[in-house]
Image (cartoon, rainbow, N blue to C red):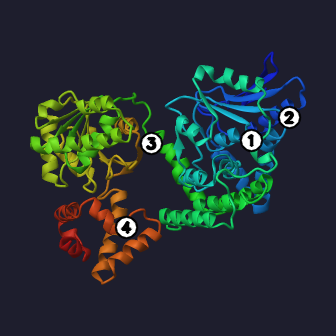
Amino acid sequence: MSKTMNMNVDQDGIAVIEINVQDRPMNVITADFADDFKNCVEEITKDEKIIGAVLTSAKNDFMAGADLKSMLPTLIGLGDASAMAERIIESHKLNRAMETCGKPFVAAINGTALGGGLEITLSCHYRIAADRNDAVLGLPEVMVGLLPGGGGTQRLPRIIGIQAALELMTQGKHLKPQKALAMGIVNELAPPDELLPKAKQWILDGGKAIQPWDKKGFKVPGGFDPNTKGTIQMFSVVNAMVAKNTNHNYPAPIAIVSSVYEGCQVPIDTGLKIEAKYFVGLLCDPVSGNMIRSLFNNKQSADKLRARPKGVDKHTVKTLGMLGAGMMGAGITLVSAQAGMKVYLLDSTQENAEKGKAYSEKYFQKSVALKKMTEEKKAAVMDNIIATTDYNDLKDCDLIIEAVFENREIKADVTQKTEAVIGEDIIFASNTSTLPISGLAESSSRPHNFIGMHFFSPVEKMPLVEMIMGEQSSDEALAKSLDYIQQIKKTPIVVNDSRGFFTSRVFSTSCNEANEMMREGVNPALIENAARHAGYPVGPFAVQDETTIDLSVKIHNQTKEDMGDDYKPMSSIEVMQKM
């Protein structure tokens, strides 16, 4: 019995292959899947009673990419680059066998299809996608330092043209089915309940079992001649854009460009070998390994709340109390309201509170203009944000987040005023970026419910949230806070308490060194550019400006006051104060 798919042949002689990788919430490519799929293709090819096949999924979505946790270690374990390339070329032969078997294959894409999942559909002779707004299609391998290694760099440009394919692959873009249809990645859309009948009908109507690139005289859509002025200009622009976006720190985008450029000049079988060469090159580069570990394996683990204490019931925040309507408070309000929560946004004056609410209004208005949100949805979300100065409005909140000035006295004042009106079991989270949580909790009558929740600016764009456990923070406080972080679709890390925690200690060290270099006479533009070329997405001066230099000075002043005689002054503070 197959562990990854089921195949049944109907009375018309059409084989329906349902991908159903066991013990996985979403289908992924595993060694067992490759074996089972090979057996199905061979059976369909040999059985004269079968006239064609439909490839679909038994799960809610079609398929994600390869199971990186199992497949990549196996590949890398071969040790030799040529052996890795041979293994990849063998996997290419399976899709080529499907393409050239003489019987039509239709991909009935019932939901999301990413990476290797989409690459399999590109090997089918016809593609019909379910018309679902919650589904996406794409080749996002570049986001983990790889290129589409299942034939994507060769088939996609041969389907939609080189320029469009490069844009999708080098940026790892996801597309809705409607956009995929407009670009030609899929041939047709269908309501989910009509997907399978339409796929079968295409076969019965005499669908051709030959790919465009296997026809004599095939030309890449839009044309491709490496010696023409147009092609030279296009690849010059593409390479320049890649360099601008990566500062030469990420090898995957340029490997994708090279694979497409070289592969589209030769027959597809040779092109697939070129793709395998570049894929192995990335596998052997430590950058891809680091990205897979951090951005795929570890991020997935964090998103699944691996640090959540066991034995605490799941908690859903319906009403949030937000203390402080400044930059951070306004951003936290935005993402919370966007997640469906009612938010009481409290500040010292109604004007400040309304200003914080206006931040969400401006953001959602842009979403409406870009047709990412309807006016009705925007109005409903904005109705859930209540700007106020009255602490009594917080009495029914499920969670409190404080994001006032980095001043211990102010934080103590709002903590005590809030605890006077909220329930005994309500978690109080401080968004402080540097002040030790255990010290701030001294002003609380319920230190076991007090925890650090450090967001980053701008909140709506930054995916990370740093959770800080104070000396008396309880498992319940951590569990409920992590549940909230998952509600707003952020990625949490959990650290113990210390001044600056983890992120601010690293961040401040970097910024202090940049300030010191400038004080010593190094050109600030040189410092910024050096940081970008070292892999930082934003230079140290730009990021200080974005988070406000005033904030850095306030943090320094509070640190000096807290540490007393133990404080060691830094010469870089002179630069901050002057700026």
Instruction: Give the crowd class for mark 1: few <14, some 14-19, many >=20 residues within 10 Å.
Output: some
Residue 87, x across and y down, in percent:
78, 52
**Element type where label 4 sits in the image:** loop
Query: Nearer the viewer's eye, disc 3 or disc 1?
Result: 1
CB atoms of marks 3 and 1 within 8 Å: no
What label does residue 121 carry, if any?
Answer: none
- Pointer 2 residue: 42
| In the depicted structure, whether residue 102 falls above or below residue 541 | above
Name the secondary structure under disc 2: helix
Task: Residue under label 4, please give it.
Answer: 539
Residue at screen point 77% across, 23% down: 204
What residue sits right under mark 1 in the picture? 31
* Kind of residue indicated by mark 2: Glu
x and y percentages locating residue 234 in the rendered image: 58, 62
Residue 492 point in image, percent of width and height: 41, 45
Distance in Å between CA atoms under marks 3 and 1: 30 Å
Earlier residue among tags 1 and 4: 1
User: From this viewpoint, is residue 77 visible?
Assistant: yes
Query: Which of the image's four quarters has the C terminus?
Result: bottom left
Marked residue nearer the N-terminal end (3 or 2): 2
> Which circle, 1 or 4, is nearer the viewer?
4
Q: Position of residue 78 (x, y in %)?
A: 76, 56
Question: What residue sits right under mark 3 in the picture?
Answer: 307
- Answer with mark 1 or mark 2, whichever residue precedes in sequence: 1
Q: Label 4, label 3: how many angstroms apart (C-alpha)?
A: 31 Å
